[in-house]
């Protein structure tokens, strides 16, 4: 079956540090890949997506590239801010109905 | 448009009681999803509606769980004879799609505690 594996947290960083969160997947067919973010007390929000191999999703300074050869979709940001403190979820979808399968989430804590 | 709204935000119930949660999706969104999230885990798919039709149910959705979406608008998720293992955050999401990949918008969830 399909699955998403992401690095465990919490990841603690200083402001302006470089952030990478690893995500790998197992799927039949050609999934669409997503990163969702959950800020404290809020619902999940779509951060970025990529729908085919070699696509790069980007938003708010975050980037992730769909790597079919390594079945990965790692999230990166060059300079994090305290406001980036949140839980980040990698997810995939393999059907036209849009059902999402999530990883366990990675908590990121950015300190001033 | 105020986004996806879920009520109540928190529910504490005694084991064996029935509970019902409500989700109001973004208007005109034809697709509605329910997910369950336990502590330290990502959301797990429960069920999906396209308009008023329930098109898929996860094996996680035992016969104690039932979901409806009358008239393709709001949706309810009912859990009968609650068990402690039902304690979780129940998330609702909606999107508009005629087949393409569009953004799913999530509500803030209903946190259920079964004591």
Image (tube, rainbow, N blue to C red):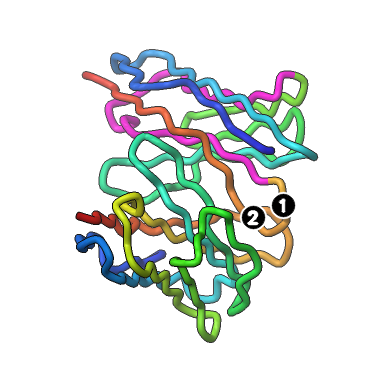
- Whether residue A76 is situated above or below residue B85 in the rendered picture: above
Going 51% across and 63% down the picture, which residue do you hit? B94
Vertical placement of A2 versus A24: above or below? below
**Quick check: marks 1 and 2 in contact, CB under 8 Å?**
yes
The quadrant in which residue B90 appears is bottom left
Neighbourhood count class around disc 1 (C-alpha, 10 Å): few under 14, some 14–19, many 20 upward: some
- Chain letter of mark 2 equals A
- Distance from Cα at disc 1 to Cα at disc 2: 6 Å
Per the image, the residue denoted by label 1 is A95
Q: Are marks 1 and 2 on the same chain?
A: yes
Secondary structure, mark 2, is loop
Query: Residue at the location (34% across, 56% down)?
Result: B108
- Local packing at callout 2 (Cα closer than 10 Å; few below 14, some 14-19, many 20+) is many
Q: Which mark is residue A98?
A: 2
Q: Judge whether residue B1 can be spotted in this image.
A: no
Quadrant of the rendered image containing residue B24: bottom left
Q: Is residue A104 magenta?
A: no
Toward the viewer: B113 or B14? B14
Left or right of A31 in this view: A92: left
As for residue A72 lying within the magenta part, the answer is yes
Q: Which residues are magenta?
A: A70-93
Quadrant of the snapshot with the C terminus of chain B: bottom left
Q: Quadrant of residue A112?
A: top left
Q: Nearer the viewer, residue A37 or A30?
A: A30
Image quarter of the N terminus of chain B? bottom left
Circle 1 SS class: loop
Question: Could you say where residue B101 lies in the image, as x and y percent from the top left?
Answer: 67, 53
The single residue placed furthest to the bottom in the displayed view is B71
At which x and y percent is residue B26?
46, 70
x, y (%) of residue B53? Answer: 62, 76
């Amino acid at each position: 079956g399909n699955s998403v594996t992401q690095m465990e947290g919490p990841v603690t960083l200083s402001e302006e540090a470089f952030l990478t969160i690893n995500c790998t997947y197992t799927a039949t067919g050609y999934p669409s890949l997503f990163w969702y973010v959950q800020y404290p007390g809020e619902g999940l929000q779509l951060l970025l997506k990529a729908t085919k191999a070699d696509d790069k999703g980007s938003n708010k300074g975050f980037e992730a590239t769909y790597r079919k050869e390594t079945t990965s979709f790692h999230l990166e940001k060059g300079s994090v801010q305290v406001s980036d403190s949140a839980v980040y979820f990698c997810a995939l979808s393999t059907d036209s109905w849009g059902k999402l399968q999530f990883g366990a989430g990675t908590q990121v804590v950015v300190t001033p | 448009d105020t986004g996806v709204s879920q009520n109540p935000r928190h529910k504490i119930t005694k084991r064996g009681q029935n509970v019902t949660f409500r989700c109001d999706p973004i208007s005109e969104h034809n697709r509605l999803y329910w997910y369950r999230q336990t502590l330290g885990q990502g959301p797990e798919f429960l069920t999906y509606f396209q308009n008023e039709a329930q098109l898929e149910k996860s094996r996680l959705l035992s016969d104690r769980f039932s979901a409806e979406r009358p008239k393709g608008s709001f949706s309810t998720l009912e859990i009968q004879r609650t068990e402690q293992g039902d304690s979780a955050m129940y998330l609702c999401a909606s999107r508009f799609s005629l087949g393409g990949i569009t953004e799913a918008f999530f509500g803030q969830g209903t946190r259920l505690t079964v004591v």
